[in-house]
Structure formats: C-alpha cells, structure tokens
Amino acid sequence: MAPCSRINSLQVAVIGAGSAGLAAARELHRESHSVVVFERQSQVGGLWVYTPKSEPDPLSLDPNRTIVHSSVYESLRTNLPRECMGFRDFPFVPRPEDGESRDPRRYPSHSEVLAYLQDFAREFKIEEMVRFETEVVLVEAQGRKWRIQSRNSDGTYGDEIFDAVVVCSGHYTEPRLAHVPGIDSWPGKQIHSHNYRVPDPFKDQVVVVIGNFASGSDISRDITGLAKEVHISSRSNPPETYEKLPGSNNLWLHSMIETARDDGSIVFQNGKVVQADTIVHCTGYKYHFPFLNTNDYITVDDNCVGPLYKHVFPPALAPGLSFIGLAWMSLHFFLVELQSKWVASVLSGRVTLPSQDEMMEDVNDFCAMLDANGIPKRYTHRLGTFQVDYLNWLAEQTCAPHVEQWRIQQVEGAYRRFATESDTFRDKWDDVHLVAECYEDFLRQKL
Ligand code: FAD
C-alpha cells in the first residue's frame, strides 16, 4: 500500500449526494478524476433533507412503494457535538458570516446540518458535478468498465459507461423490523421510525416503542408530551427490567416484548402487560442496493454487505466498485472524508491495494475475529470500539494525520452522556476544555 507517483485520471460515477457523496466528489475531483454525481433528490444533503412527508405504508413493507429517502423527524437534533461531527478541513462550527436563521447550538437541529452540507457543496463547487432528480437504476460491470443506467424525473433514461463507480447511497431508508411473537394478530397500529415525523398522531395514546438506541430514545421522549403513556422495549436490557425514566412522568423502560396478543395487549418479558394503541419500531435499517447487479458476488446477509475489504472495496471488483459510508456507530462525516481520500488515491494509482487474495484473506480474518468475539453478523459494519483504529488505519493509507485526541474524547464523552443522561445530554456537558482545544486546532488549520 505504499504511495507511488503514477496518476490516472478516470471517469467516476458517484451515487448519492449526501455527506458521503459530497465528500467523495470533492476528493475524487481533488485527485483529478472527472466526476458525475447521480442524485435522485432535487438537492444535496441526503438524509438531512427533512420532509414532513412520509411513506404511505407506515412499515414500508411494500417493495413498490414510493420511497421517501429521509428518516429525519421534525424535532431531531444531532446526537454528537458539532465540533467532532464535521469534516476535518471544513469544521462544523458557527461562522461570523452565517445569518440569524442558523442554529448555533452545540447539538443543533437537522436544518443546521443540512445548511452545513450545503455550505460544503458550495465551497467546493460540488453542485456543478451533480445530476439532480436522476436515479441510478442499474450498475453492472462491462468488461473492465462500469455501466450505469439512470432515470431522470422527466422519464428519460441514461445509459453510460464509467471507469469506476462509488456507491454513496446511504443506509437509513429501508426499515428493519424486529420479530414480535403474535404481532400478526395484534390489532393496533404500527409504524417504523423511518416514517415518524411529529408526535401529534399519538395524542392520548398508549405507545410501545421498540428499540432504545438513538431514534428510539429520541422518539419516545418526543411522544411523551402528548401521549398517555410511552413504554420502551429494549433487547439490551435484562429480562426483569422495569424502570420509570427521568425527565417525564409517563415513560417506562422494559425488557423485550414476550408476546403481542389479539386483545390489543403487549406482554413484556418482565411480566408487565399494557393495552397499547400503537407500536413504533425503532429497530434500524437494512442495507439495500436495488440498482446493483454483481451476479450475486456482493450479497447482503443479515445486514452484512460482503465481501468487502475494510468496509469499502469488494476484492474481485476493486478498485472499480467501492462503497463509502457503510460503516456505522462512527463519526460519519470524518469517516467518509477519509474513505473518500483512500478511494480517490487508489483510483488514481497513487496508492495500491493488496492483491485480491490478500484482501479476501483480510475479509475472512475480520469475520473470524467478529465470530470469535461473539459479535453478531448484523454488527459487521458497526465500528464502535474499533472506530479509532479503523479511522487511523484509513488516515495512514493516504498519509493523512491520525484522528485528533480531542475528537476521540468528545465522541466518547458524547456516547457516555447519551447512555447515562439521555434526557439532558444535548444541553448539559462537562467537556468545555475539549471545545476550547478543538477551536485552537481549527484556528491553527486556518493559519
Ligand atoms: P444519505 O445522507 O442517506 O445520502 C444518500 C444519498 O443517496 C441520498 O441523497 C439519496 O437520495 C441518494 N440515493 C440513494 N439511492 C440513489 C439512487 N439509486 N440514485 C441516485 N441517488 C440515490 N450522523 C452524525 O454524524 N450525527 C448525527 O447526529 C446523526 N444523526 C442521525 C439521525 C438519524 C435519524 C439517522 C437515520 C442517522 C443519523 N446519523 C448521524 C447518521 C447519518 O447516516 C449520517 O450523518 C449521514 O448524513 C449519512 O450520509 P450518507 O451520504 O452516507 O447517506
């Protein structure tokens, strides 16, 4: 993987203009590639383009439904402090030139993240590379090149050949549902968090929220103001769990659901029974690439996309096909910035990949390590405690600096506060010294 001096300038297609696609377009362009970004929405920002519209099918089960890309709800604020969340060389901090419509809070609203991504796109002239309202419907290898078929909003089809394709299509649109025994005959309403926007429809209801990670925790608190009762069911809690949560008088935490009954009741493993009106599934999302035809070389099995070398390159199809932003529980913008630098420099030939066999061996070793540590397959792309090593590994591929200490400490503190003070973590924190440290760092970068 030693850097070399040969530079190839390729025709590269990027699918998606969310944070990953924007970072990819910038790095590919910097590396002298010619870039076309395909984006099915009418603006940049991906997931952060909030819409009050949701899909007509509240569980999004119908494969032929009209897709609404975003899963952002109206009250959403970031779950990370903004300083550590942004791209390295375009910090996500309030700027003197930003108008009053902006949200200067440390954990700002979704609209502030969108405004930041729009600023990023403007600063690096990325919109000029984007074909808006153009959905990629097919990606397949054609000899050593890649064929892309696309469909424009006016119904016209495109059929083009590129040297390489970088998939940045996101993975928070296709809902994943938990199996609840008895659910098929349970008479209440069900909705997945992908289609949750505002709490109003839950007024005076008894609501069961399945899942207590970021969306489950946020949505249950959003609903408590209007609902009669909110009961969170979490599989990471011991079976006897039954706890009234702080911050509101109608919010309880339970263990998993044991069964849903046809009389409308929900029985938890802790023995408690509630008569519920609605279940909100905050149970995550599935990787889904309906446009990708690799003759079954790439598969999605229990939410593991494979085989992928370092979550990015499929060994037999590399470097022509790559995926940016699949890894999660991470500093997403920072991650996609580093992955993009790596992909761009591999494509230009400045950085070489190991052989196909070596990459496959690495993939197999990684899967064996997950297995040996009892990590389920569905967590293959969850970085969590592996995040710092992975980010530093990526940085080393392109001689970029390692992740800053303040950034690591901020994110670790944020995860800790989220787990222990989930009702207040966005407005109270104890790491002011790290805020000062990162501003000094940003200032040094500018000099
Ligand atoms: P997306 O933003 O989903 O972008 C993918 C783009 O690809 C979209 O614009 C889509 O229209 C386009 N696309 C898809 N398919 C096609 C196609 N076939 N043809 C053309 N275009 C296509 N991360 C944080 O760092 N901080 C947070 O606080 C945070 N909060 C979150 C809250 C929620 C509710 C969720 C679901 C995620 C959150 N995340 C957060 C993680 C989030 O995924 C990232 O922040 C990130 O913005 C995702 O960027 P992306 O570019 O990978 O995907």
Image (cartoon, grey):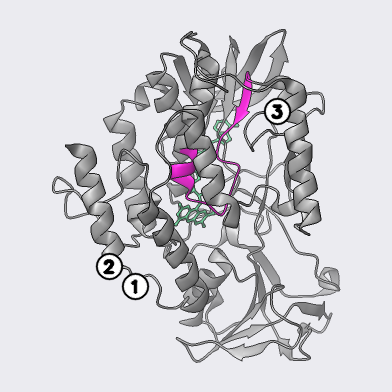
The CA distance from mark 2 to mark 1 is 7 Å
Between 408 and 201, the residue placed more toward the observer is 408
Q: Amino acid at mark 3?
A: Pro
Image quarter (top left, top right, bottom left or bottom right) of the N terminus: top right
User: Is 350 located above or below residue 279 in the figure?
Assistant: above
Q: Secondary structure at mark 3?
A: loop
Residue placed at 80% from the left, 46% from the top?
Answer: 368
* Above or below 266: residue 431: above
Secondary structure under the numbered disc 1 in the rendered image = loop
Quarter of the rendering occupied by the C terminus: top left
Percent x, y of residue 219: 53, 70
- Residue 373 percent coordinates (x, y): 76, 58
The residue most toward the left is: 96
Residue visible at 47% across and 19% down?
A: 36
Q: In this rendering, does residue 50 appear at all?
A: yes
Span shown in magenta = 319-336
Residues under numbered marks 2 and 1 in contact, where contact means CB atoms less than 8 Å apart:
yes
Disc number lying in front (2 or 3): 2
Q: Which residue is mark 3?
A: 314
Taking the spot 44% from the left edge, 43% from the top edge, the residue there is 334
Residue type indicated by callout 1: Trp
The circle on residue 432 is 2
Q: What is the x, y in percent for residue 224?
A: 50, 81
User: Crowding near pointer 2: few (<14 within 10 Å), some, many (20+)?
Assistant: few
Mark seen at residue 82? none
Circle nearer the N terminus (3, 1): 3
Which residue corresponds to mark 1? Answer: 429
Measure the alpha-carbon separation of dots 3 and 1: 41 Å
- The amino acid type, in three-letter code, at marker 2 is Val
Left or right placement of residue 88 versus residue 380 in this view = left
